[in-house]
């Protein structure tokens, strides 16, 4: 059975896009990128949607690019893959709706880039953040090198990029990467979304 990597749920003026392949650690595969791009486009055509919540399942928000797929790319397809990721993060950042990342667990690599593109980020107590590219000999190409230093400062961003060190939700809150820690994080994001809608 071909199950979509993202579920789309609507609650009034709130759209919830949930990454739902936890057994694969919610990778940002080509199929996931295509599905997310289509979902964001549908929402862009619905001005009644005021808030978009991105979240994951079980203990994973997003684990980043699908490494096995990356190894099959040639220079031309790698460029297209990078550009698609950039276009999607920009679509998140510039959407007419407020975008909230409800980070329920591991938020790694390209997944962190997607969270950084959101207007607001909140996380569960067990959330973990990292850019592991240094261990793989690669660096993110989806805007993280620009957005992370702007949010947490150049020093911490450089350390995260250079060492692949993981930071906890507590450290992320202290650094300004997230605005609150809450469990269940999706419930907290929904409450926040309703507050945003009530004042808009």
Image (spheres, rainbow, N blue to C red):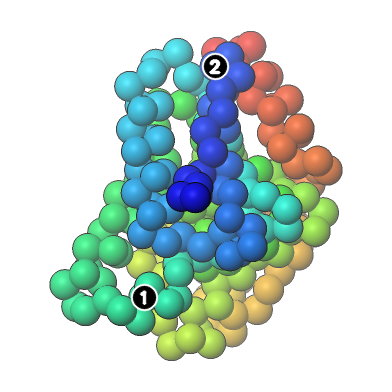
In x, y percent, where is residue 199?
61, 12
Could you say which disc has been placed on residue 99 in the image? none
Q: Which of marks 1 and 2 is nearer the N terminus?
A: 2
Residue 33 appears left or right of 100: left
50 or 56: nearer the viewer = 56
Residue 199 seen in the current view = yes
Depicted 166 relative to depicted 110: above or below: below
Number of numbered discs: 2
**82 lies above or below 45:** below
Residue labelled with disc 2: 13
* Circle 1 Cα neighbour tier, 10 Å, few/some/many (<14 / 14–19 / ≥20): some
Q: Quadrant of residue 195?
A: top right
Q: Position of residue 158 (x, y in %)?
A: 53, 76
For the C terminus, the image quarter is: top right
Q: In which quarter of the image is residue 127?
A: bottom right
Q: Position of residue 47 (x, y in %)?
A: 39, 16
**Secondary structure of the residue carrying numbered label 2:** loop
Check the image and name the residue furthest to the front: 1
* Residue 10 position by quadrant: top right
Q: Which of marks 1 and 2 is in front?
A: 1
* Residue where numbered disc 1 is placed: 70
Q: Where is residue 32 in the image (x, y as percent from the top left)?
A: 43, 53
Q: Is residue 99 above or below residue 147?
A: above
Question: How far apart in space, not on screen, are marks 1 and 2 (Cα)?
Answer: 36 Å
* Residue at 64% from the left image edge and 25% from the top image edge: 193
Q: Is mark 1 on a helix, strand or loop?
A: helix
For the point 54% across and 16% down, the residue is: 13
Residue depicted at 21% across the width and 69% down the height: 77
Q: Which is more toward the observer, 46 or 144?
A: 46
Q: Residues within 10 Å of mark 2 (few under 14, many from 20)?
A: some
Visible residue check, residue 175:
no
């Amino acid at each position: 059975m071909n199950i979509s990597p993202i579920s789309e749920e609507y609650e009034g003026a709130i759209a919830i896009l949930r990454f739902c392949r936890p057994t694969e650690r919610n990778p940002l595969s080509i199929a996931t990128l295509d599905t997310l791009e289509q979902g964001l486009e549908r929402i862009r055509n619905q001005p009644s949607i005021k808030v978009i919540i991105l979240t994951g399942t079980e203990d994973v928000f997003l684990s980043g690019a699908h490494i096995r797929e990356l190894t099959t790319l040639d220079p031309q397809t790698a460029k297209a893959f990078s550009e698609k990721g950039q276009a999607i993060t920009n679509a998140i950042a510039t959407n007419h709706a407020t975008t909230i990342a409800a980070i329920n667990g591991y938020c790694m690599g390209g997944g962190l880039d997607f969270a950084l593109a959101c207007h607001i980020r909140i996380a569960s107590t067990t959330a973990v953040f990292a850019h592991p590219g240094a261990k793989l000999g690669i660096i993110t190409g989806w805007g993280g090198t620009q957005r992370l230093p702007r949010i947490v400062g150049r020093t911490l961003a450089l350390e995260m990029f250079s060492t692949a060190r993981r930071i906890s939700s507590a450290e992320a809150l202290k650094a300004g990467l997230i605005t609150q820690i809450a469990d269940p994080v999706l419930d907290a994001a929904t409450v926040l979304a309703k507050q945003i809608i009530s004042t808009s």
